[in-house]
Amino acid sequence: MEDLFVSYELALQLKTKGFNEDCFTLFDEQGLLDNYWDLDNEEFIYNQSIKDLHLPKRNSETKNVTAPLYDQVIEWLRDVHNIHVHPNFYMNRFSNLMDYEYQVHYRVDNKWQCMKITAEDSRSNAIYQALKLF
Amino acid sequence: MEKLFVPFVIAQMLKEKGFNLNCFTVYHGENDLYKFWAKPYDELSGDDHTTVRNSDFIKNSNIVCAPLWQQAVDWLREKKNIHITTMESDGKYIFQVKHYFEGVGNTTYLPSTNYYLGLRQAIIAGLNFIYYYDNFKKTSS
């Protein structure tokens, strides 16, 4: 399930950029994801701090950093900053398989601009690039 | 947080087509999203903080795992070679559903003014491709 959440480094940057949506979980001070869903029942029940973490959290309510899902970040960029991050699929002529890149669409002087991110982990990289725009 | 999960009808279709990834929560009947994350000690389940899979509920057809939109889109791409993407222009969205079957590509474009309604249509279109090709395989074999 961890791969559904953005990395700690990205979450830190999002907090500085004002991301403050409800999230399922948090990163601790060491940057580890509080994956409460993997705990066994006994451990869960006796760990009061983890019990509290089960409720949705916002950055404004915690000294830690919330762990957003990728979808939440992409939606936040779209709805709050009018920056659109999405994959673009195409047929790779060499491998004959579907391949994809991420694109970041944003407005400058009322004209749409597009950045194409083809590097490995292109979704995270696209979000990093999007965060540099404001 | 509820809006992050696919609606019941899509969750059901995904289950029918073999979606069996770990999910954070379930639907317990139509329109009854079980809010595990907000109810750590709910009466229905003693271990509700753990993830669940559709295969955990084979005997109870009322319970359907509720994937995130993100999980549904990723699953269609990785397991079914169905690729959903979106473009936005002046508040309107165009969802593109691409898939390849036996070397032949097919693309559907779905316009929408609402992101989640458009995504819902796109996922249903993707699932319809699966239904279509499953039937095609059955009748041609």
Image: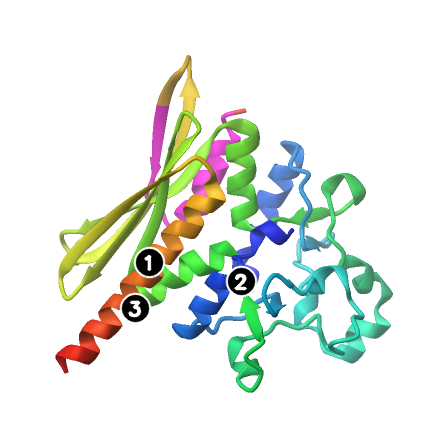
Is A118 placed above or below B90 here?
A: below
Residue designated by label 1: B126
Q: Residue at x 58, y 82 (%)?
A: B60
Asked if badge 3 and badge 2 are on a common chain, one would say yes
For numbered disc 1, what is the local secondary structure?
Answer: helix
The x and y percentages for residue B95 are 35, 43
The x and y percentages for residue B139 are 17, 78
Along the viewing direction, whichever of A21 and B89 lies nearer the viewer: B89
Q: Outermost residue, top direction? A: A109
Three-letter amino acid code of the residue under disc 2: Phe
Q: Residue at x 51, y 81 (%)?
A: B55
Along the viewing direction, whichever of B5 and A78 lies nearer the viewer: B5
Which numbered disc, 1 or 2, marks the residue that appears first in the sequence? 2
Along the viewing direction, whichever of B125 and A47 lies nearer the viewer: B125
Asked if badge 3 and badge 1 are on a common chain, one would say yes
| C-alpha gap between disc 1 and disc 2 | 16 Å
For numbered disc 3, what is the local secondary structure?
Answer: helix
> Is there CB contact under 8 Å for labels 1 and 2?
no
Residue designated by label 3: B131
Q: Outermost residue, bottom direction? A: B59
What are the residue bounds of the magenta stretch? Answer: A113-133
Write down the chain letter for disc 2. Answer: B
Residue designated by label 2: B8
Which numbered disc, 3 or 2, marks the residue that appears first in the sequence? 2
Snapshot quadrant of residue A58: top right
Q: Residues within 10 Å of mark 1 (few under 14, many from 20)?
A: many
Say left or right for B78 vs A34.
left
Q: Residue at x 36, y 61 (%)?
A: B76
Q: Residues within 10 Å of mark 3 (few under 14, many from 20)?
A: some
Along the viewing direction, whichever of A10 and B140 lies nearer the viewer: B140
